[in-house]
Image (cartoon, rainbow, N blue to C red):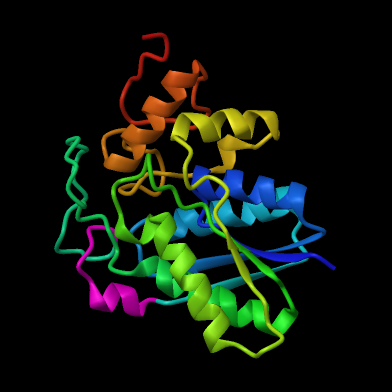
């Protein structure tokens, strides 16, 4: 049986990736990680709602709060405020050092136990924030590492279906797949109403504007969806 583990953070990228995995695989399993991020409570809440919508075969929620202890990111470190988006091309301080390697490693352990042969992750290289662990080459390399570090009969493929898409692209894909965007959460700053000013909010808002679709989640700021 074709089994896949899907990394589901609760954001719209992982939500669309989950929809793609649901279409392509016989059985899907959802993995959610709490790494001490400031919006952990909200992300876990939307993850549970996404789980109810897609009905995976099983779910796993893992605490990896040591990433908060390590710090170095505005998402986890209370001493680093979440900044408003400024359009800089430098790697932003919202980057959680090598986070996606931790996610893939945990997914690999679970995949080997349940016999899953695919891991889906909603990483984006061309329309992300320039995070180094979102590059296509990173996942190709990690797949080789998995092959070297698991049992001989274990064969696991890392699937990155939106790696070369833009956020506007994934909204269109999500629309075609009937994705419930109202269940997703992208804000880096708030757990109740999205701020509309942080990097993740701005990229999301701009993508919805580009597609001519109004984002179904509420924002603190007033947004002209017609402009």
State the residue in front, 134 or 7.
134
As drawn, 18 above or below 140: above
Residue 72 visible in this rendered orientation of the protein: yes
Q: Nearer the viewer, residue 16 or 46?
A: 16
Q: Is residue 72 magenta?
A: yes
Residue projecting furthest to the right: 1
Residue segment shown in magenta? 65-75
Q: Is residue 184 left or right of residue 2?
A: left
Looking at the rendering, in which quadrant would you find the N terminus? bottom right
Q: Residue furthest top?
A: 226
In percent of the image, x 41 and y 15: which residue is there?
Answer: 225
Q: Residue at x 45, y 35 (%)?
A: 167
Q: Is residue 155 magenta?
A: no
Q: Position of residue 65 (x, y in %)?
A: 37, 76
User: Residue 29 lies in what quarter of the image?
Assistant: bottom right
Where is residue 66? Give x, y as percent. Answer: 34, 80
| Residue 33 point in image, percent of width and height | 49, 68
Q: Is residue 208 left or right of residue 47?
A: left
Quarter of the rendering occupied by the C terminus: top left
* Residue 26 in the figure: left or right of residue 112: right
Is 150 located above or below residue 78 in the figure? below
Q: Residue furthest bottom?
A: 151
Please report the residue visible at 42 percent of the width from the left and 44 percent of the height from the top: 186
Q: Nearer the viewer, residue 190 or 32?
A: 32
Q: Nearer the viewer, residue 201 or 162?
A: 162
The answer to whether any part of residue 34 appears in the image is: no
Q: Residue at x 39, y 49 (%)?
A: 191
């Amino acid at each position: 049986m074709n089994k896949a583990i899907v990394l589901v953070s609760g954001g719209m990228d992982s939500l669309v990736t989950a929809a793609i995995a649901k279409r392509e695989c016989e059985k899907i399993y959802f993995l959610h990680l709490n790494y001490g991020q400031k919006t952990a409570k909200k992300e876990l809440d939307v993850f549970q709602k996404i789980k109810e919508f897609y009905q995976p075969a099983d779910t796993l929620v893992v605490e990896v709060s040591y990433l908060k202890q390590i710090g170095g990111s505005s998402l986890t470190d209370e001493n680093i405020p979440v900044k408003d988006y400024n359009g800089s091309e430098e790697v932003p301080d919202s980057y959680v050092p090598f986070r996606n390697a931790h996610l893939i490693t945990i997914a690999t352990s679970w995949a080997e136990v349940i016999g899953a042969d695919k891991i889906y992750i909603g990483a984006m290289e061309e329309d992300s924030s320039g995070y180094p662990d979102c590059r296509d080459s990173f996942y190709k390399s990690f797949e080789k590492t998995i092959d070297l570090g698991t049992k001989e009969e274990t064969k696991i493929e890392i699937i990155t279906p939106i790696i070369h898409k833009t956020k506007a692209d994934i909204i269109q894909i999500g629309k075609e797949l009937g994705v419930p965007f109202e269940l997703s959460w992208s804000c880096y700053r708030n757990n109740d109403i999205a701020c509309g000013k942080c990097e993740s909010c701005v990229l999301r808002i701009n993508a919805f504007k580009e597609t001519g679709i109004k984002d179904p989640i509420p924002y603190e700021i007033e947004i002209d969806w017609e402009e």
